[in-house]
Amino acid sequence: MITRRHFTTLSASALVMAALPARAGAPMRVLASPGCGCCHAWADLARARGYTVTVEELTDPEAQKSERGIPLELASCHTIEAAGYVFEGHVPFEALEAVLKDRPDITGLAVPGMPMGSPGMGDDPSARFDVIAFGGEAGTGMVYYRAGTVQPFDT
């Protein structure tokens, strides 16, 4: 028999679970450049947000990125695989989570290079840089998110 206390506990648990973002069910595989501390810093931030993260070292970065459809001009130090998408470099979690939630017809997102202030590179929310969508409807690349702006999804 379910008591009022059990019902209240179950109801509260259901509300909490419903409020969890897409990340709760999205394990991530991070392919990191050998010896790169910022790759591991990004992975640590992902873990702190509730993701299950495994980290492996890239053995042939150019080939491994090409295999995943990442244009080499958008390359960075690490590649993330999650829920059928590819995220290249220091992608902000707000942009990554929007992709995981909305499931757009793209291969993934990229932050070319290693912009200072991006996640894993200082974590400054006011840092300005573009996040580029690529593949699928985004073609060879289009701005998806403008970090450090008041309305980052207005591109």
Image (cartoon, rainbow, N blue to C red):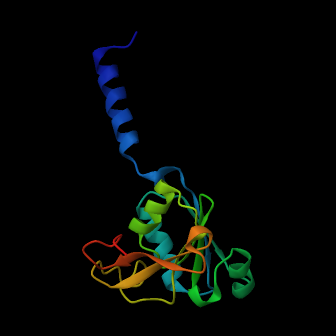
Q: Quadrant of the C terminus?
A: bottom left
Q: In this picture, is 103 found above or below 138?
A: above
Residue 109, horizontal then vertical, whole percent: 53, 73
Number of numbered discs on residues: 0
Above/below status of 149 relative to 54: below
Q: Is residue 107 left or right of residue 46?
A: right
User: Residue, x 36% and y 70% (percent of image)?
Assistant: 153
- The percent position of residue 111, horizontal first and vertical second, equals 49, 82
Question: In front: 37, or 140?
Answer: 140
Does residue 100 show up?
A: yes
Residue at image location 33% in from the left, 73% down from the top: 152
In-image side of 35 versus 9 (left or right): right
Corner quadrant of residue 140: bottom right
Specify the quadrant that holds the N terminus.
Answer: top left
Work out whether 15 lies above or below 115.
Answer: above
Q: Position of residue 19 (x, y in %)?
A: 36, 45
**Of residues 3 and 68, which is closer to you in this image?**
68
**Residue sitting at 47 percent across and 56 percent down?**
102
Percent x, y of residue 27: 57, 57
Q: Going by the picture, which residue comes out furthest to the left?
A: 150
Tell me if residue 29 can be seen: no
Q: Is residue 16 above or below residue 132?
A: above
